[in-house]
Amino acid sequence: MRNFENAKRIVVKIGTNILTKGAGVDAGYVRRVAGQVDSLLRDGRQVVIVSSGAIGMGVGQLSDHQGSRKSSLAGGARNVKMRQACAAIGQPLLMAEYRKSFIRYGVTVAQVLLTTEVLNHRKTYLNLRNAIETLLKLSVVPILNENDSVSTDEIGSAFGDNDKLSALVASKIDADLLIMLSDIDALYDRNPRKYADAKLIPTVFEITDEIVRNAGGKGSVHSTGGMKTKIEAAMIASNAGCRIVLADGRLKNVIGRIIAGEKIGTIFMPKRKLSNRARWILNNSPAGTIFIDAGAMQAVRNRKSLLPSGVLGVEGTFEKGAVVMLNDNARAVTSIGSSQLKSLAGKHSTEIKKLLGPKHRDVVAIPEDVVMIDY
């Protein structure tokens, strides 16, 4: 389980609370991370870093220059517009620290800022994947962060202190291992901050409903993570066949010790292995829902096409090629837009070509474009 000898592509997620110190970044910590990553590179591995901390650094920079307004700035960091401004200020400062630390080892780093829109659209997602692949081939370490300054979603609701982002990245670049470094050192059977007898869970083979219920809420003022977002991240990465280790990021040489197989934190074992396209479908934000009957649901479970005769109704507005829900059980790429599908619901497949033309597929979704959720 903890034999990572063959783990060639590794994603390391660094949380806000372990990356920052006081009002700024912990430069010493970044240097130590750089040294550990350099060791992995020298061992022939590829590393991608998903880094939080920009908002906290922005708050610290503003506080340094506006002294007496320090407390009000910290409180204002909960406001979306203020967090966007702080992210814009803090991101170049964060990257400067990474560059300074990695250059000591002769390693080049690259900044990649993402939004949910980039990951949800197939074309931009493939462009992103190609860019990261090229950087890795050049032995460059990509450093990814959510583009908080322009994100159309409320900051934190999209990726949760980059926990979800790190899992999506690990999934989409076929990573072998995701290391989540946090001030949360492991998964426990109950909240260790409330219960002294809470027991650490070293290995998780299945994320149960009980684990999800016990996950709790959000993190601190400058971070939006918490155990809940880490569990959600583990669920995403496990579908990619990627192992996940959640550990205390402040442990000495924590990355090297994890790679060496030391029993640190909690390891989440993968549940199933999906193709790259299937993972993109599963992790996309659905544009709407197609409600289908029991017979149609059984058909798609058996890897058969979804036909219009099994469609009961449509919710939402979407175009051909959009990712949609099939009831609450699956996600699929639809070959028919919502307006046309409403008129075709319950009808025979031949009606599709009558309405949309002879060259159009006579199905709503093909098996390769359907991914079950409740597998």
Image: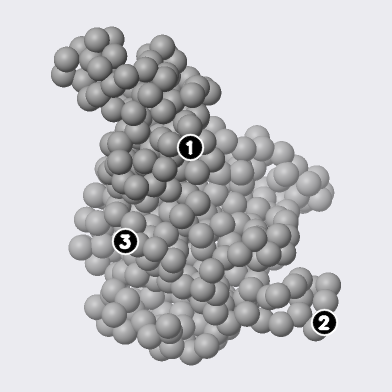
Question: Is 351 in front, or is 339?
Answer: 351
For this view, does 86 lie left or right of residue 78? left
At numbered mark 2, what does the secondary structure look like: helix, strand or loop?
loop
Tell me the mark number nearer the camera, choosing from 1 and 2: 1
- Identify the residue at horizontal 24%, vertical 56% (top origin): 133
Find disc 2 in the rendering and name its residue: 196
Residue 284 at least partly seen? no
Question: Mark 1 and 2 residues: CB-CB less than 8 Å, in contact?
Answer: no
Earlier along the polypeptide chain: callout 3 or callout 2? 3
User: Could you tell me residue 345's position as x and y percent?
Assistant: 42, 19
Q: Residue furthest left?
A: 359
- Identify the residue at horizontal 50%, vertical 29% (top origin): 291
**Looking at the image, is 372 positioned above or below residue 29?**
above
Tell me the mark number nearer the camera, choosing from 1 and 3: 1
Real-space Cα separation, disc 3 to disc 2, in angstroms:
39 Å
- Identify the residue at horizontal 23%, vertical 15% (top origin): 353
Question: Is 280 in front, or is 361?
Answer: 361
Earlier along the polypeptide chain: callout 1 or callout 2? 2
The amino acid type, in three-letter code, at marker 3 is: Asp
Disc sitting over residue 174 in the figure: 3
At numbered mark 1, what does the secondary structure look like: helix, strand or loop?
helix
**Looking at the image, is 209 positioned above or below residue 83?**
below
